[in-house]
Image (cartoon, rainbow, N blue to C red):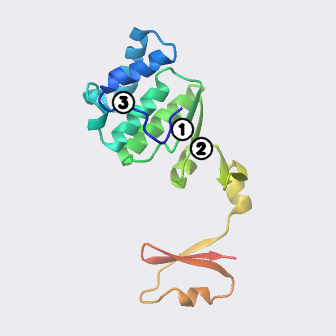
Amino acid sequence: FMPEERGLYPKMGIVDQVAYFGQLSGMVAGAAREQAAKWLTELGLDDRMTDAAETLSQGNQQRVQLAVALVQDPDLLVLDEPFNGLDPVGVDVLSGVLESRVAAGAAVVFSSHQLDLVERLCHEVTIVDAGRVVAAGPIGELRAHHATPVLRVEVEGAGTGWARAVTGVASVREAGGALLVELA
């Protein structure tokens, strides 16, 4: 399990810390340290292994959290907002690790508000709103069944009022200098 909130000891070196969590889950000290070093290297932290967690950026702390979740080579990973705080390189590294775990037979369940990553990485999704499942299934099926057409419109010097007055427009919002017009 990898919680969204950090669960690291701030003053402890990260390789010692990951190994410690491995030992807490029943691993022998030597094997835990070996696996800790392996995962930290795979996650791009091989040059920071003796650094205290508090000296790391938020993204690197997120990588350490993932190493803690991976150290015991679990069959199931449950991750809460695993991409928070990661730069694009960190997102790619984490995505690659998750894909390799799935290819090795592990199940990965994660929550995320970053829908582009969800779409890129997931075979099936469950959408929860206010604690209730509102949709679940393969992404293609959900898109075909629930999608509403959205048009990106760029009109120089025009506000949003004209778009709201067009028949068949359900909503209008501004995004990056353009209007996103959702059709009914």
- Write down the residue under mark 2: 122
Q: Is residue 56 left or right of residue 139?
A: left
The answer to which of 172 and 19 lies nearer the viewer is 19
Residue matched to label 3: 9
State whether residue 72 is above or below residue 120. above
Q: Residue furthest right?
A: 145
Name which residue lies at 34% across and 26% down.
Answer: 41
User: What's under tag 1, amino acid-wise?
Assistant: Leu
CA–CA distance in space, label 3 to label 1? 19 Å
Disc ID at residue 17: none
Q: Residues within 10 Å of mark 3 (few under 14, many from 20)?
A: few
Q: Residue 94: x and y, percent?
A: 44, 38
Task: Identify residue for label 1.
Answer: 79
Report how far apart the C-alphas of labels 2 and 1 lie in the structure. 13 Å
What amino acid is at disc 3? Tyr
Determine the image quadrant of residue 182.
bottom right
SS of the residue under disc 1:
strand
**Residue at screen point 60% across, 86% down:** 164
